[in-house]
Image (cartoon, coloured by chain):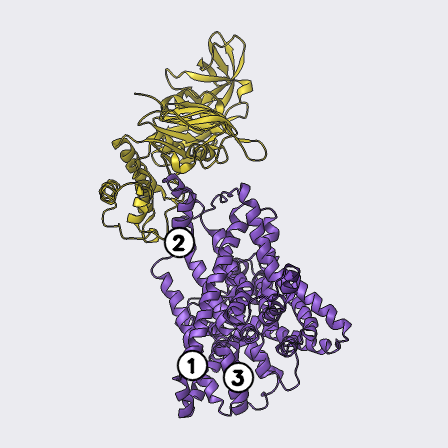
Amino acid sequence: MNDPVIECRRITKRYGGGPVVDDVSFVLRPSEILALLGPSGSGKTTVLRLVAGFESPEEGEVSVLGRLVSGPSVHVPPDRRHVGMVFQEYALFPHKTVAENVTFGLHRIGPRERERRMAEVISLARLDGLEGRYPHELSGGQQQRVALARTIAPRPVAVLLDEPFSNLDVGMRRRMRRELAGILRGNGIAAIFVTHDREEAFAIADRIGVMRDGRLEQMDTPQVIYNAPAAPFVARMAGTSDFIDAEVRGGLAVTEVGKLPVTSGNGALSEGERVKLLVRPDDFEALPHEKGPSVVRVQEFLGDTTVLEVEMPSGATLLCRQRSYWPLAPGTRVALVPETDKQFLAFSESQT
Amino acid sequence: MQSISRPLLARAASEAPLIIRAPAVLVGLAMLLPLAYLLIRSMGASGEAWDLLFRVQTAQTLGRTALLMVTVTICSAAIAVPLAWLTIRTDLPLRNMWSVVTMLPLVVPTFVGAFLFISALGPRGLLQQALSPLGIEQLPEIYGLAGATLTLSLLSYPYLLLILRGAWINLDPATEDSARSLGHGAWSTTLHVTLPQLRPAIAAGSLLVALYTLSDFGAVSLMRYQTFTWVIFQQYESSFDRSIAAVLSLVVVAMALTVLLLEERTRGRLRYYRTGAGASRPPRVFRLRRWKWPALLLCTFIVTLSLGVPAVVLVQWLVRGVLAGEPLLFLLTATMNSVAASGLAGIAAAALSIPLAVLVIRYPSRLSRILESVSFIGYALPGVVVALALVFFGAGYVHPLYQTTWLLVFAYVVLFFPAALGATRAALHQVSPRLEEAARGLGQSSEQVARSITIPLVRSGVLMGAALVFLVAMKELPATLILGPLGFETLATAVWSASSEAFFARAAAPALTLILISSLPMAYLVTRERRPTYLGTGA
């Protein structure tokens, strides 16, 4: 039984002007954690709200466990979808205690079963002893755990999380995301979460969907998203990226820093084609060389590594990450040496 | 090294400078004066006066007053809650117009409203005349509890609406979405999530309405419903022993304190605000669909009753009066008197609120908290009570001031100071001390900073406070009747003396003038962002 928990088919949502969500399709499989990654305004939160039922799409369909919940002339209200949602600001009920918040979604079951489930969820979210507190009497991390406990208490078929870590400070964020992923995975809860932080998406998601201007650009595993992005935009969302001009000749890419092994995500490369190569900071090593064609412009010491901004003969710049024991002052002439066995990904000029 | 001089209005580690502290303390003492003098006067009251306190009539008055407070508060809530919801959360047609229009009954004084309702809805009023072709000879009596409740509810619900709207607009809509996704329907969400979060606002607004009812004199007198204010006024007018009125006033003060405590109780340990920070998405708008017409009908009904009926009746009486040759000349003096006394009170209250607001916001301390609580006394004390206290005080100690407009202006300031303080405090709250420090860092002196940064930023808030005080002072009746110098006529007293003798045609012109002049500050207020704090209840 591997039927999708949630399926969106070509959903489109407009607010007055252009589409906020444009022809988006994807499935969420059982026990899967899906991340929607994109800059603010890319429509990722709207996708969540469409799935939850707070908005209805102008076109397309949403199904939950095979049942159509949004579609032409169908709109199942949020309270009948069995899809839980954790809000960005948690939206804890300020007038209810932790226990009352957690049991709020358990109104359809008997009191004994309700007590049992509450105890279960409270201990799952490590909230023991806080049952009588009010939300404003809790720390940020505790508030987030209450929000999660409240959402999973009625055993929703899936949980939607809207920027769940954006309200926490950096150190807390890492701990909470490990904890949250643990709870979701430990209980086999399928989830979709929205974030603009790629590290967050890489750390917990099974698959990542990258969104831009309401469109889903690519959805795949974190490894594929990072190593084989379908478009330069996806490459930039997935990691620090530079693009250098190249021309395909004899199966190699000829660039101003030498001939490089090249590969293409979509189809073969034709001889003489002008392309852009994706370069990550780890792809080149900058070696000091008196007659080197490139010059170090900026040196940023980060402790374990140092990032250099290197200017190539054409004036274009690249970022290079180096081990820190090799200081290269600005003005040093260098040669750029590619990592061995590195295949550079080429995009056609029109894509960038 | 150059010595560092502190910005005039900036926060400092040490105490507030004397230039702030001294006037603030003086204002606090002035606010306490009526209550203190009332206590002194009651101490010296005869045993007979104290015996009166325990008579059956006193208990009956107490019961009537409490009953009216309850009915008016409930009716006001029943009007304000649906109106707030319709004008904030639904796709009601002409929503913005309704949110302004439903606030307008605030400009109609209760004694004007009462005489208009009597002549429109009384046994042989306009409504009966309109219905007589249907064979209706007489409508039920409007005097008494029903009429008083009707008048006060229709004219005081905007106080509750104002506070409720402020709270509702700031309510985080995500809590409602959250309840929906947890399987609660629209009704259950409203009942368990929305309304409970609005409870503090409803309580604060109800408090305001209850105190307003307690202090009302005009409506209850015209509707012949004898509450404490009426009884006290009668005692003052007719009895030789004026300390009887003082003793009765203490009962009213006790009632006000009881209401305040009740409101405090409902808050308890809960603090209602968003647990997170940052912008929230705008709330989802509830589509009324086929409920659109009933909703429009409800709004129209309320506005017709609270504004339409008074307007029609007023114009009718005006025309009748002019045709009958009622003199209009006295209007000029009365208008000037009203505007002068209320205007002075507005300016004085706004000016006096500045040192206190600075002390409260920039130098929080025990002193500032005490002074702030003391300055809210005006809200709890009915005009009759303050006026009486000042009569005793003026006649006994500052005779040159007795029977002058100054004592009346002072009464207005004591009564309405909370409105001014609330507005000034809210405005000053918006000005971060960091702003002033930044300006100091750019090489400006403290006087330059005050002139170029602080004053421009708080000016509109202070002006709103002055406008609000002006508006309510224009409508004030009992203190004006008691403290106004002999022969001193204002628009309010002119309406009162005519309408209490049922010369409605003579009351129409001053009433209309009063409403029109009050509309000016009201227009200024509604075009500004509406915040509950401007009514000064955000204590």
Q: Mark 3 sits on what residue?
A: B234
- In the picture, measured across the screen, residue B496 lies left or right of residue B178, that is right
- Chain where mark 2 sits: B
Q: Nearer the viewer, residue B35 or B500?
A: B500
Q: Secondary structure at mark 1?
A: helix
Q: Mark 1 sits on what residue?
A: B58
Q: Are marks 3 and 1 in contact (CB under 8 Å)?
A: no
Residue type at mark 2: give it. Answer: Pro
> Residue A343 falls in which quadrant of the image?
top left
Q: Which mark is residue B196?
A: 2
- Chain where mark 1 sits: B
Chain B: what color? purple
Q: Is residue B92 above or below residue B305?
A: above
Separation of disc 3 and disc 1 at Cα?
A: 13 Å
Separation of disc 3 and disc 2 at Cα?
A: 42 Å
Q: Which mark is residue B481?
A: none
